[in-house]
């Protein structure tokens, strides 16, 4: 079984800084701590409204991140131009609405297939891996393959929000089936959104899963236990809680 790696989403280190508009806590310093404690990479979302991560953070992270630097972004011309200048290791295309608290739902790949395919080509020409954040549905995985994207990141948010046991199981099955389908047609699999230390273990059984993007739960735990410990605990959970 291939290893599942953790990319820590550090957006909310920047959220805390933006609360006072100063310089601390610094997400770039946070990225170093995450990587020193077992993260395989760092993820940030440069949002059009710049509510947390700023352009300067992205430039600083490009210099400092030693593993995978994954930039989440909307299909926005301005952000695409910035990403072309930065050349991260991976971009993850996400939908973005100004008034949402966090990313809601996956990309509408069908409605944007021409534009997404163009963006995939642009970034492939720069040597950048492309991932599409999508709902765990076979149909969307098929469309993602048509765009030429390397990965789908399966949206785990509905699973994480499910309360009743039957609903949790249904959402888990949806994720596992979509991943199985992705692998069978040659699309690689990442997952993320809403994952925490409690709801993660069943996700580790996802077929072909390579990378997890986890942010809010790690930064939240870090407030009480420190970032190094919070990252280490998640990395340990990924390696020990995986079903054989
Ligand atoms: N993956 C994607 C595409 C996201 O948009 C986010 C949130 O920014 C995450 C993963 C991480 O979600 P969370 O902060 O809930 O762990």
Image (cartoon, grey):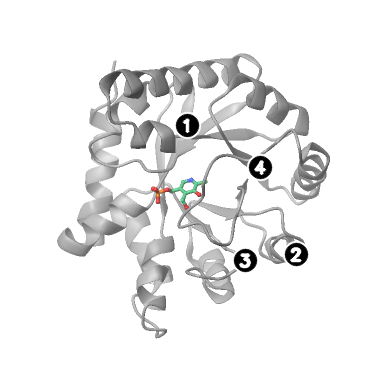
- The mark that comes first in sequence, 1 or 2, is 2
Q: Which residue is mark 3?
A: 48
Crowding at dot 4, Cα within 10 Å, few <14 / some 14-19 / many 20+, comes out as many
User: Where does the C terminus fall, quadrant-wise?
Assistant: top left
- The mark that comes first in sequence, 3 or 2, is 3
- Is disc 4 in contact with disc 2, using a CB cutoff of under 8 Å? no
Mark 1 and mark 2: Cα distance apart in space: 28 Å
- The mark that comes first in sequence, 3 or 1, is 3
Residue furthest to the bottom in view is 22
Closer to us: 233 or 132: 132
Mark 4 and mark 2: Cα distance apart in space: 15 Å
Q: Which mark is residue 130?
A: 4
Q: Which residue is mark 1?
A: 210
Judge left or right: residue 143 versus residue 213.
Answer: right
Which residue is depicted at the point 31% across and 17% down?
A: 166
Q: Which residue is mark 2?
A: 81
Mark 4 and mark 1: Cα distance apart in space: 14 Å
Mark 4 and mark 3: Cα distance apart in space: 19 Å
Mark 3 and mark 2: Cα distance apart in space: 12 Å
Closer to us: 28 or 224: 224
- The mark that comes first in sequence, 4 or 1, is 4
Closer to us: 74 or 231: 74
Q: Of helix, strand and loop, which one carries label 1? A: strand
Q: Of helix, strand and loop, which one carries label 3? A: loop
């Amino acid at each position: 079984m291939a290893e599942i790696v953790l990319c820590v989403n550090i957006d909310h280190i920047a959220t805390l800084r933006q609360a006072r508009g100063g310089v601390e806590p610094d997400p770039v310093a946070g990225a170093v701590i995450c990587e020193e404690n077992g993260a395989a990479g760092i993820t940030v979302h440069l949002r059009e409204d710049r509510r947390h991560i700023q352009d300067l953070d992205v430039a600083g992270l490009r210099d400092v991140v030693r593993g995978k630097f994954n930039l989440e972004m909307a299909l926005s011309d301005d952000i695409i131009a910035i990403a072309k200048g930065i050349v991260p290791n991976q971009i993850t295309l996400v939908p973005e609405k100004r008034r949402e608290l966090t990313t809601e739902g996956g990309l509408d790949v069908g409605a944007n297939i021409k534009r997404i395919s163009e963006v995939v080509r642009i970034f492939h020409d720069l040597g950048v891996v492309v991932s599409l954040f999508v709902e765990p549905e076979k149909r969307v995985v098929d469309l993602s393959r048509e765009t030429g994207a390397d990965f789908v990141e399966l949206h785990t948010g509905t699973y994480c929000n499910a309360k009743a046991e039957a609903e949790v199981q249904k959402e888990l099955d949806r994720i596992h089936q979509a991943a199985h389908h992705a692998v069978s047609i040659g699309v690689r699999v990442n997952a993320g959104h809403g994952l925490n230390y409690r709801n993660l273990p069943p996700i580790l059984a996802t077929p072909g899963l390579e990378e997890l993007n986890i942010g809010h739960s790690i930064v939240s735990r870090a407030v009480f236990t420190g970032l190094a410990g919070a990252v280490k605990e998640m990395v340990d959970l990924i390696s020990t809680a995986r079903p054989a």
